[in-house]
């Protein structure tokens, strides 16, 4: 039994106990898994000028959002490069919940002082916890704790307020694994008890497992993929931004390779450089279950508009035998249960 992952903001006064990583990832892919995402930074912004304030972080048009909608967006540093990704939940007229893995996204908005604008910001980092239930059986598992028929109506990237064992929570249909799943926003005072109940029926999993799952799905992580000065077009995420930054002839790919590195929560160290032709700058990597190979994400240089290379060299010599593979890595034909409706 490995013991890891204390909640970063110390709102859950327990140490979560998890099994081995392969068992956790299999549970998520085949059944259901429970993750603690309470390390996320969150805030509520309200008032007539809410979107004006939000535009200082995220470059996306949120005007047509309806109550209950969730939007994915990108935030930028002062140089105009992507620094993180966020989700924005519309709770009501001129009222939004912002979530980000990067504390600066919340800190920067909290530091704004503009007396000419009508807005209010509430720091929620010590007031709420976020749990994620992911996997093809996630709805079935959650139905033990709430009205499953009501939750079944929820569309992808939408959320609702719903009673969970006597506690009013927000539940959104989204996740970080590529699987069907949900995220629960729960008041911190009730979070420890709710975790106890959820983990009695759903396999609790740690950060190493979620990292492996998101790499398999081809999802970015701000602490890895945004280490390089990249634009939304380099990331292939331009549909989530109105920034219109220039592309730098970079492309984010998923690869399979070999390494002798310890890949538990692996991240690149030192200063990264932009790749040359035939090179890949590896930004994320994890073990491939049941194989001596590893899989990962990295940036390559586009040398021709109509063609691409199939193998690459790591200039830092940490990975070799690197070949590009389609994303998502685990199910390129999309034949598994995650593609079906509940």
Image: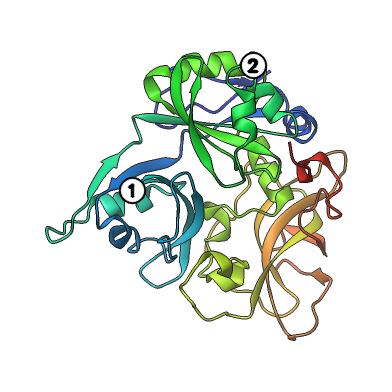
Q: Quadrant of the C terminus?
A: top right
Identify which residue, 321 or 19, lies in the foreground: 19
The quadrant of the rendering that contains the N terminus is top right
For disc 2, the neighbor class at 10 Å (few under 14, some 14 to 19, many from 20) is some
Task: Give percent across and percent down for residue 210.
Answer: 64, 39
How many angstroms separate mark 1 from mark 2 (CA)?
32 Å
Residue at 28% in and 59% down: 53
Which residue lies under the disc numbered 2?
A: 144
Callouts 1 and 2 close, C-beta under 8 Å: no
Which image quarter: residue 182?
top right
Q: Which label's residue is closer to the chain start, 1 or 2?
A: 1
Task: Name the one closer to the observer, 175 or 285.
Answer: 175
Which image quadrant is residue 65 in?
Answer: bottom left
Q: Look at the picture and state if 267 lies above or below 125.
A: below
Q: Which residue is mark 1?
A: 93
Which sits in the foreground, 35 or 297?
Answer: 35
- Secondary element at tag 1: loop
Please give the name of the residue rendered at 39% of the width and 24% of the height, measured from the top-left corner.
188
């Amino acid at each position: 039994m490995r013991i890891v992952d204390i909640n970063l903001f110390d709102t859950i006064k327990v140490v979560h106990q998890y099994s081995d990583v392969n068992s956790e990832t299999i549970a998520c892919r085949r059944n259901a898994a429970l993750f603690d995402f309470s390390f996320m930074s969150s805030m509520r912004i309200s008032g007539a000028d809410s979107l004006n304030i939000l535009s200082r972080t995220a470059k996306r048009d949120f005007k047509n959002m309806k109550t209950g909608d969730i939007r994915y967006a990108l935030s930028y540093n002062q140089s105009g490069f992507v620094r993180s990704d966020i989700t924005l939940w519309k709770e009501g007229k001129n009222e939004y919940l912002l979530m980000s893995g990067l504390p600066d996204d919340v800190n920067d908005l909290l530091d704004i002082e503009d007396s000419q604008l009508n807005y209010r910001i509430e720091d929620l980092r010590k007031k709420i916890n976020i749990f994620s239930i992911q996997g093809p059986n996630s709805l079935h598992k959650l139905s033990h704790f709430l009205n499953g028929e009501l939750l079944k109506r929820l569309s992808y990237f939408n959320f609702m307020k719903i009673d969970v064992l006597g506690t009013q929570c927000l539940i959104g249909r989204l996740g970080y694994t590529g699987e069907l799943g949900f995220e629960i926003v729960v008041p911190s005072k009730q979070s420890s008890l709710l975790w106890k109940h959820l983990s009695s029926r759903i396999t609790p999993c740690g950060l190493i497992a979620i990292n492996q799952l998101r790499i398999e799905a081809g999802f970015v992580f701000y602490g890895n993929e945004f280490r390089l000065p990249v634009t939304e077009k380099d990331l292939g995420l331009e549909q989530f931004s109105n920034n219109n930054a220039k592309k730098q002839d970079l492309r984010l790919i998923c690869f399979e390779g070999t390494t002798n590195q310890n890949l538990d929560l692996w991240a690149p160290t030192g200063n990264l450089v932009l790749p040359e032709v035939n090179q890949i700058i590896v930004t994320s990597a994890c073990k491939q279950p049941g194989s001596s190979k590893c899989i990962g994400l990295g940036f390559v240089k586009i040398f021709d508009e109509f063609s691409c290379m199939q193998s690459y060299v790591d200039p830092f010599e940490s990975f070799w035998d690197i070949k590009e593979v389609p994303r998502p890595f685990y199910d390129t034909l999309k034949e598994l249960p995650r593609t079906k409706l509940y």
